[in-house]
């Protein structure tokens, strides 16, 4: 084991001589150990995302066989990038250690599920929550209780096991369920948040909030249309 570590250090010292020249040997080992743990943690989050995506794809496939349509339009997943991890740990006042990242952040692994209809969101969330190998740690229902700015989405923090060569490890994944319309709104909102020097910001905030209302009523009407179509199919 020790030998392996030294080999990695030798490679690193060779690859980054300028960096390593100035760091005492004992500290080099510590830095590399931390880097390795961080890389491993990110790999574990990627695996947790794969497990979660598989579960969602299974539900999607079964549903489409039974009902001849897909409840899921698309899935977008990401592991939070290192700079955002560091920024959030700093903003929340947490000491920056690898263990602490896992303990304090619940959204390092993120899975966004885009559905056509609001009812599909609750169907999928309920089916997922009922599975006995995972645990729902937290639910934030911003569809029933939208944020003041108009943001809508259903968030679940889910703890899911991954199976590695020598252990079963529980990982947290943030799953966000949105309709296509909610996702459209959130992506415009997100873009504006990161745009510097936006003028008329009060007006923009108010316009966005109004759009969120419109979008919500469109989602409700689309759901009603779909229900009417499905009832019509039953009558045939
Ligand atoms: P974060 O520090 O942003 O993670 O907030 P939080 O831990 O209080 O959780 P919350 O459930 O409020 O938000 C988690 C995630 O939902 C964010 O990282 C965004 O992806 C999304 N989100 C929340 N609020 C908004 C919003 O107002 N606009 C947009 N576009 N996305 C949002
Ligand atoms: Mg978050």
Image (tube, rainbow, N blue to C red):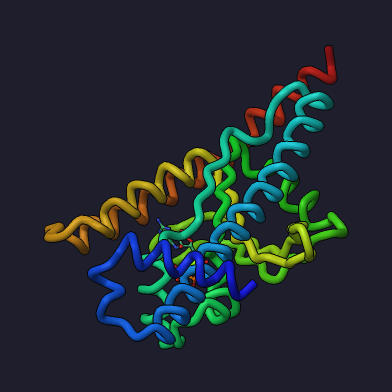
**Front position in the image: 86 or 58:** 86
Where's residue 183, x and y in %?
46, 45
Rendered position, 55 above or below 200: above
**Front position in the image: 207 or 181:** 181
Residue in the image at 31% along x and 82% along y: 23
Q: Is residue 143 among what the camera can see?
A: no
Residue in the image at 57% along x and 40% along y: 75
- The image quadrant that residue 32 belongs to is bottom left
Where's residue 88, x and y in %?
40, 74
Residue in the image at 65% along x and 47% along y: 50
User: In the rendered image, which quarter contains the N terminus?
Assistant: bottom right
Query: Would residue 198 appear left or right of 171 to someone viewing this image?
Result: left
Query: Would residue 211 appear left or right of 136 to someone viewing this image?
Result: left
Where's residue 31, x and y in %?
43, 78
**Front position in the image: 69 or 28:** 28
Rendered position, 140 above or below 71: below
Residue in the image at 27% along x and 67% along y: 17
User: In the rendered image, which quarter contains the C terminus?
Assistant: top right
Q: Is residue 178 among what the camera can see?
A: yes
């Amino acid at each position: 084991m020790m030998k392996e570590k030294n080999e990695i250090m030798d490679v690193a010292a060779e690859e980054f001589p300028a960096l390593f020249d100035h760091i005492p040997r004992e500290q080099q080992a510590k830095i590399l150990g931390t880097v390795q743990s961080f890389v491993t943690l990110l790999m574990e989050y990627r695996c947790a995302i794969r497990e979660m995506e598989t579960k969602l794809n299974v539900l999607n496939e079964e549903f489409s066989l039974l009902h001849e349509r897909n409840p899921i339009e698309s899935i977008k997943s990401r592991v939070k990038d290192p700079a955002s991890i560091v920024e959030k740990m700093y903003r929340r006042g947490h000491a920056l250690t690898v263990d602490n990242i896992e303990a304090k952040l619940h959204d390092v692994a993120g899975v966004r599920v885009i559905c056509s209809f609001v009812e599909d969101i609750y169907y999928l969330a309920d089916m997922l929550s009922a599975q006995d190998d995972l645990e729902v740690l937290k639910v934030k229902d911003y569809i029933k209780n939208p944020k003041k700015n108009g943001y809508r989405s259903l968030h679940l923090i889910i703890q899911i096991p991954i199976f590695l060569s020598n252990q079963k490890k529980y990982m947290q994944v943030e799953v966000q369920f949105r309709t296509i319309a909610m996702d459209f709104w959130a992506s415009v909102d997100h873009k504006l948040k990161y745009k510097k020097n936006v003028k008329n910001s009060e007006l923009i905030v108010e316009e966005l909030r109004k759009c969120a209302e419109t979008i919500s009523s469109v989602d409700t009407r689309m759901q009603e249309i779909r229900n009417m179509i499905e009832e019509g199919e039953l009558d045939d």
